[in-house]
Image (cartoon, grey):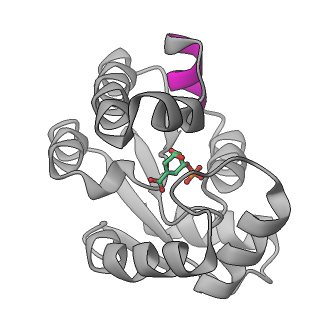
Amino acid sequence: MARTVVITGFMGCGKSKVARALAASLNLAMVDLDESITARTGRTPAQLINEDGERAFRIVESETLRDVLHSRVAGVVALGGGAWIEAANREVINEYGCASVWLDVPFEVCWSRIETAGEDRPLGKTRDQAFALYERRRPVYELANIHVSVSGREALDDLVATIKACI
Ligand code: S3P
């Protein structure tokens, strides 16, 4: 499997966890885009959004994504929840011939994880704000090559096996 796999989906859908497990099972390196952004800028995505605004964050996010894909170090990339929403990022992902996987998780499952994670998610501060974003983004996540419906109750190994069967 030579194609880089990118994992997308809403905040709290489990992108990083699934990407890490998938990469381990394929014996490939995994890169978490949000962590790469933090390493590059010295600030977390939440800090960048809070301090510089979402547009400025998206520029850094796109640059980081391009560099990650260009370096070809990662077999599996966990995107941030908004990275796939930017058309330019989807183009880059397609240019690099990646397989894109959407983890389609019900809003309530995402929201309960967002609420309990205690992480700063400036674009998902309230349930209403997060739900509006979830609904707005769904048609764009649908553009991913591979659609994996996740209830949130599956064993991680089963999810990995499902994705491996599709890529
Ligand atoms: C964002 C999701 C976050 C992070 C940033 C913006 C979004 O990542 O990139 O806060 O626009 O949905 P997670 O999806 O890992 O929470």
Q: Residue furthest front?
A: 51
In the depicted structure, whether residue 128 falls above or below residue 54: below
Question: For this rendering, which residue is in front, 93 or 2?
Answer: 93
| Residue 122 image offset from top left, x and y in percent | 56, 51
Can residue 32 be seen in the rendering of this structure?
A: no
Looking at the image, which residue is at 60% across and 28% down?
44
Task: Name the quadrant of the N terminus.
Answer: top left
| Residue 16 image offset from top left, x and y in percent | 65, 48
Looking at the image, which residue is at 60% across and 56% down?
15
What secondary structure is the stretch in magenta mostly built from?
Answer: helix
In the depicted structure, whether residue 87 falls above or below residue 92: below
Q: Find the magenta span and give its range.
A: 35-40
Q: Is residue 92 on the magenta stretch?
A: no
Question: For this rendering, which residue is in front, 12 or 29?
Answer: 12
How many numbered marks does the figure carry? 0
Can residue 13 be seen in the rendering of this structure?
A: yes
Q: In the figure, is residue 79 to the left or right of 125?
A: left
| Residue 68 image offset from top left, x and y in percent | 40, 23
In the depicted structure, whether residue 108 falls above or below residue 71: below
Looking at the image, which residue is at 23% across and 43% down?
89
Question: For this rendering, which residue is in front, 56 or 18?
Answer: 56
